[in-house]
Amino acid sequence: MAEGHVPALRRGLALLGVLARHAGPVSAAALARDLGLPRSTTYHLLAELEAAGFVVHLPAERRYGLGIAAFELGSAYLRHDPLERLAGPILRRLVDQVGHNAHLGVLQGNELVYLVKERPARPQTLVTDVGVRLPAHLTASGRAMLAHLPVAHVRALFPSAAAFVRRTDRGPRGLAELRHTLSAHRRLGWAVEDGHVTAGFASVAYPVFDHGGRPMAAMSVTFRHLCDGAGCTETWAELAAQVRQAADELTTRIGGQRP
């Protein structure tokens, strides 16, 4: 490619990045402002990207959105299991540091699905395994992500009392309790659960963020800890710092950013 074409490519990619960060279609004027480009240059870039299928023009709204080609790229990205491939070595190092089981999980509806699990040399038997689904409001990983979602989104995921499945005698019993728990996690900086999934085990988790600062996964460490009742207030700050470092590394590797 000729050297003079590189700036145009960079601008085109930057434009796609801006569109991806917005929740809906964007006007050309807003794109020009966000990119610091003349409107004429912005319209030229939009025309080229539209011709290639990466951008779609919505005349009635006078706005632009991502096209089918961008969707196809995103689908191809997911087919290559990028999160699992990138997270595996990071989780392995985390396990070697802390000596506990470590996981990568994602939200699917109001459930937490485990994508990767790494075990120490002498593993402990857990219900968590690759492909296992657990109620997100009980797991540290699920709550680490829920804590960074809009209030309306959380409410939609848990529309009634029936959504609050329980596995032990601990954990949020309704939306008000869940909101209180998520608020506490935000203040703390990470999520914890102590006997909410399995009695005698606790977990610490931190989210992995996408390019828009949205939670797309979470890393967690699970270990033996017997909670003896109402005084279960451990937060494991030192362990959380190690989990956060691993999650931040994955966020960086996928081109994400913390909000």
Image (tube, rainbow, N blue to C red):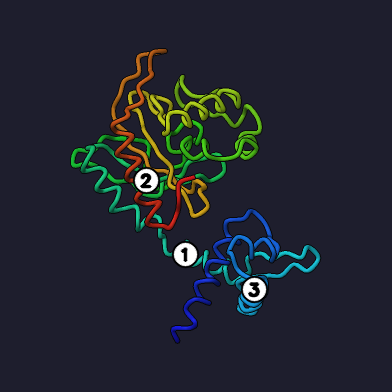
Q: Which label belongs to residue 46? A: 3
- Identify the residue at the far left of this view: 121
Q: CA distance from mark 2 to mark 1?
A: 20 Å
71 or 25, which is in the foreground? Answer: 25
Label 1 element class: helix
On the image, the x and y values in percent for residue 128 come to: 37, 39
Element type at mark 3: helix
Which of discs 2 and 3 lies nearer the camera? The answer is 3
> Residue beneath label 2, please?
247
Q: What residue is shown at x 62% (from left), y 55% (from top)?
A: 22
Q: Which mark is residue 187?
A: none
Front-lying residue, 41 or 224: 41
Q: Residues within 10 Å of mark 2 (few under 14, many from 20)?
A: many
* 20 sits left or right of 121 in the view: right
Gap in angstroms between the C-alphas marked 2 and 3 = 35 Å
Which of the 4 image quadrants contains residue 86? bottom left
Residue 201 in the image, given as x and y percentages of width and height: 33, 27
- 217 relative position to 35: left or right: left
Residue 223 against residue 113 in the figure, above or below: above
Numbered disc total: 3
- Asked if residue 161 is positioned above or below residue 252 in the image, the reply reads above
The amino acid marked with disc number 3 is Leu
Cα separation, mark 1 vs mark 3, equals: 23 Å
Q: Which residue is depicted at the point 62% across and 35% down? A: 151
Amino acid identity at mark 2: Ala
Return the disc, 2 or 1, that comes first in the chain's sequence: 1
Residue 14 falls left or right of residue 227: right
Which label sits on residue 77? 1
Q: Nearer the viewer, residue 15 or 88?
A: 15
Quadrant of the image containing the N terminus: bottom left
Q: Residue at x 48, y 35 (%)?
A: 143
Between label 2 and label 1, give the one nearer the viewer: 2
